Amino acid sequence: MSITEFTLLSLWVSGLLIALSVVVLSLIYLERKVLGRLQMRLGPMRVGPYGTLQTIADAIKLMTKEDIQPEWADKRVYWVAPVLVFIPAFMVWVAIPFSSRLVVQDLDLGLFYVMAFLVLSIVGLVMAGWGSANKYAVIGGLRAAGQLVSYEIPVIMVVAGIAIFTQSLNLNYIVDQQSPVPFILVLPLGLFLFFVAGLAELGRTPFDIYEAESEVVGGPFVEYSGAHWAVFFLAEYVSTFAIAALTALLFLGGWGWSASLQNWVGHPIGSEAIAFFEMFIKSYLVVLVIFWVRGTFPRFRIDQLMALGWKVMVPLSFVFVLLVAFATFYGWPWWVLSITNVLVLVGMGWGYHNKMHRLPGPASVVLHSAREVRDAR
Amino acid sequence: MDQIPNSVEMMVNMGPQHPSTHGVFRMVLKIDGERIVDVEPHIGYLHRGSEKLTESETYSQVVTLFDRLDYVSNLNNELVFCMAVEKLMSVDVPERAQYLRIILCELNRIASHLLFYGTYGLDAGAITPIMYSFRERERIQNLFESVTGARMMHNFIRIGGLKEDVPSDFNYRVQELLGKLSVAINECDTLLSQNEIFLSRTKGVGVIDSREALEIGMTGPPLRASGVIEDVRATDPYQLYDRFDFGIPIGSNGDAWDRYYVPLEEMRQSIIIIEQALQQIEEGPVVAQIRRITRPPKGAVFAHAENPRGDLGVYLVSDGTGKPYRVKVRPPSFCNLQALKPLLRDAYLADAVIILGSLDIIMGEVDR
């Protein structure tokens, strides 16, 4: 590697780090505002106009706070864990493009690389749980391991399906493949599986089981404070944004919808800016859906989560791969895939609905008249 | 549950500082993986010796101590003690005072159940319902503030009646409030009750049958959720409750969902009671003609009433002086809490929170 290449790469990486930090700050602000609106609140309003500086104030507070280390903690494991969570979350971004040229490294195995790094943060979570010498943290860490490993399978199977369909693992190429029809129309089942399993990968509601506030009080993070906790927090939001960007890339057509506008502008920087803008909006829309889900749903129990993972998500993801493989092998037109996808999705929804209504009926509470009760006595 | 060979049980201290033990309650859980093998509840972190303290206070001062038992349904507590003293002294409380007591107590019941609804959502991991329920609770608190001068610890229900008459616009304000509340309760119902994740978390979880519930001594919504028709307002009517027609929600499964839904339905019935009371209420005095210094005759008396959490009983012994000789409180939360140990055995760790939440305990009342 020559010196110029190295300088260029370091510039890219530091630029990425800064950009991601800004994105995370904006995401935290956005989440608090969106949740506030969902809950009839204003969200942060005090620090800066409309509370825009709130996250910066919080960041400063976290950085200047004392880093507490439990006396019994396994010190090395305890300090290394946040780094091991953050580095994979950050490394994922090396291969995620925001336009055809706005990417640190346009890898041919980009999707493979991203998936490989997304899994790694489990190690950090388990280490954090173990190193904290706290029982809640241990339970949380073990829950994280079980949950993340289980839900890795559907994510990988969906990605494999897309790789089969596009014959490529290059994210740039996958976006190009969606130019007439985005995969949200071709593979809606894939989008569903990817998004739900992605939520579980991120440990966000309704799958926030390993950090369940009302049960294990933050799980692996319970003993962390100050800057180290902030690193976990940063990693969580970087990963959230990564899943959102991947959803936009794999299913929402990436930056392809504004192609005619990009061609019309012609100027390379201008068209890149338009492409970036499109990706940006799509990723943020997916993030908004994630926040919306957080404001709406209660939490699963761990056995229900596992049942959903292994009895619904994993079999469905295999069905998905088979469907895509058949369609690709026999060269079926794309609408055959979308119809079969929708059928499988509807069937799953119907089955789940039926299962829920086999439970003792919701109308189990009946009214008795107080007057009759009174007269009977 | 079959013991897995070579598995090690882990002791986990849940509480007294834990977000979902509803106060300073401590459970020592023995868990095997995610399964609870055994639980040892520890109470007493909020013990203030309220019962003993009553013996050194005058009767009118004791009312303030009762405020602090179940600190989210203060007026209901005040009522029970005043009822006991009035029974001992054979005081005829004016009708207007009794109607106002019922209106205020039913409003307090709604406020208390709204708090339960919100925190139960939080226990299940849903963060939004509490905001909706607290908006409504705030309206009730504001009304209380304008009537009694305090948002909690009102000291408004006095021996022989009320401290003073309500403001002149009380009827209108309560009517307005009821309109908003009935909309909001339906809103809360649609927000959480039929959510499929919530159903799967609560249906069939923590089932207790009616016999066991009665043996433990449970009362109130948790008992009614198990299918026992028992509501002091109907089975042993006090004040003017025999003049009202309302429904008593009775569950059939005795699971956490029923224990969640019974209070929700009770809020609707409370609104019906208040509406009837507002129609029947007439002008008149709000306090009986009694001596300023309360000095009941010698004797013992028991009074009980349907509190939001169940049957609150007061056993009062008087030796004829200005201070009670002995006051024994039968707190509903304490008795309902006894169901925790049988319910938690073999439950999942996450269910510990769901089950404890569904029993709806207030530590101020459990520990006294």
Image: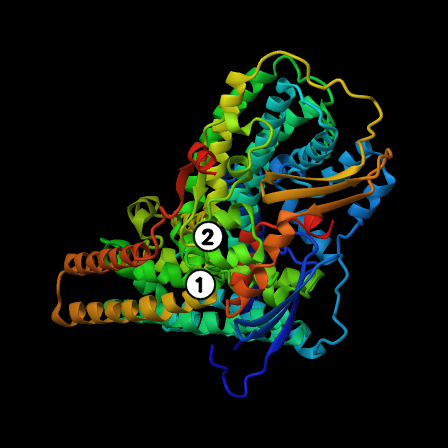
Could you confirm whether marks 2 and 1 are on the same chain?
no
Left/right of residue A257 with respect to residue B115 in the rendered view: left
Q: Quadrant of residue A225?
A: bottom right
Mark 2, chain letter? B
Q: Residues within 10 Å of mark 2 (few under 14, many from 20)?
A: many
The residue at the point 59 percent across, 22 percent down is: B99
What is the distance, in whole Å, between disc 2 and disc 1 at their CAs?
A: 35 Å
Residue B81: % across, % down: 71, 36
Left/right of residue B258 with respect to residue A220 in the rendered view: left
Establish if B221 lies above or below A111: above
Rendered image: mark on residue A359? none
Question: Which residue was labeled with disc 2?
Answer: B226
Front-most of residues A373 and B43: A373
Residue A354: % across, % down: 27, 56
Identity, as a three-letter code, of the amino acid under mark 1: Ala
Question: Which residue was labeled with disc 1?
Answer: A200
